Amino acid sequence: MNTFFPGRWISGATLIMGPAVMCAGYLLRYLSTVTALTPQQQAWAEAQPFAAYGQLLAYASEPALLTFSYAVFALGALLLFPTFVALAQRIGGGLASWGAALLVAGLFARLYFAGADQTAFQLTEVIGLEQATNAVMKEYVDISYGPWRVPVWASAGQYAGSLLLAIAAWRSGLFGTARAVMLLLAGGTWMGVLKGASIPDVLVTGLLAVALVPLGVQVLRDRLPAPAGRRKILSW
């Protein structure tokens, strides 16, 4: 396995760092919004049909804080690319390959959304919050779906991919039921432009870290776990 991309060191490091940084990104996006908005502004944002209204308002209030949180989130998406590739290699088989490929497609969509987020934020700097909000929301569907709707179709890969990879990890014996469910749950987080993070997002991504970090440590030590053999419903 050391001769194949991403190799033992990158595999082990990203299995540890990828989910941890992504979890931090969700947490920072949640905390930055709560910090930037007053209770009255939060109530107003929650009454809007899309989270984008509140995110743009939060950026106008605390641009440095929102930029930092969105940057950490984007970094988490980048690190998860070799993470899922490494996981699929250690599972082996076509089902794992399909799952990882679909998950990576979802990560590419996240990076497209990150670019759209940054563009929307910079519009508030150039033309002001009100005009930027009006412009973004007027074209929100086309911005979110992307050219020829490629990004939005790619984003669906996250949901299907996490299911396939979780099943493959369980069938192979690399993960027990608990860790396979953790991987599956993490694939259910939202996708899109200017979305608001929540505590459940933080928790399920934290569970992904719980599932993958021990494997990353074992990869770095070059001591991969032996397949579990007979699969049990209640297993780690």
Image (tube, rainbow, N blue to C red):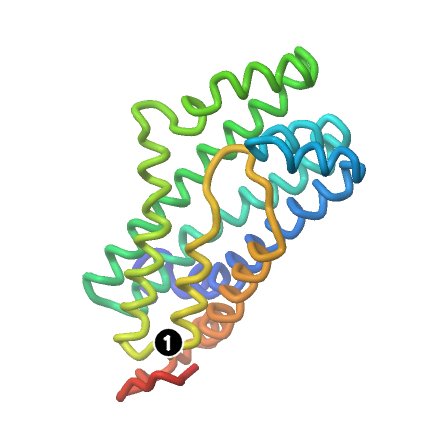
Read off the residue under disc 1. 175
Q: Residue 185's quadrant in the figure?
A: bottom left
Residue 45, horizontal then vertical, whole percent: 67, 33
**Residue at the (54%, 19%) spot, across then down:** 136
166 or 141, nearer to the observer: 141
Residue at far left of view:
94
What residue is at 40 percent from the left and 38 percent from the top? 109
Total marks shown come to 1
Vertical placement of residue 20 versus 158, above or below? below
Q: Residue at x 63, y 21 (%)?
A: 122
Residue 136 vs residue 174: left or right?
Answer: right
Q: Is label 1 in a helix, a strand or a loop?
A: loop
State which quarter of the image contains the N terminus: bottom left
**Front in this rendered view, residue 218 or 9:** 218
Q: Against 136, is 26 above or below? A: below
The quadrant of the rendering that contains the C terminus is bottom left
Rendered residue at 53%/59% (across/down): 205
Q: Callout 1, which amino acid? A: Phe
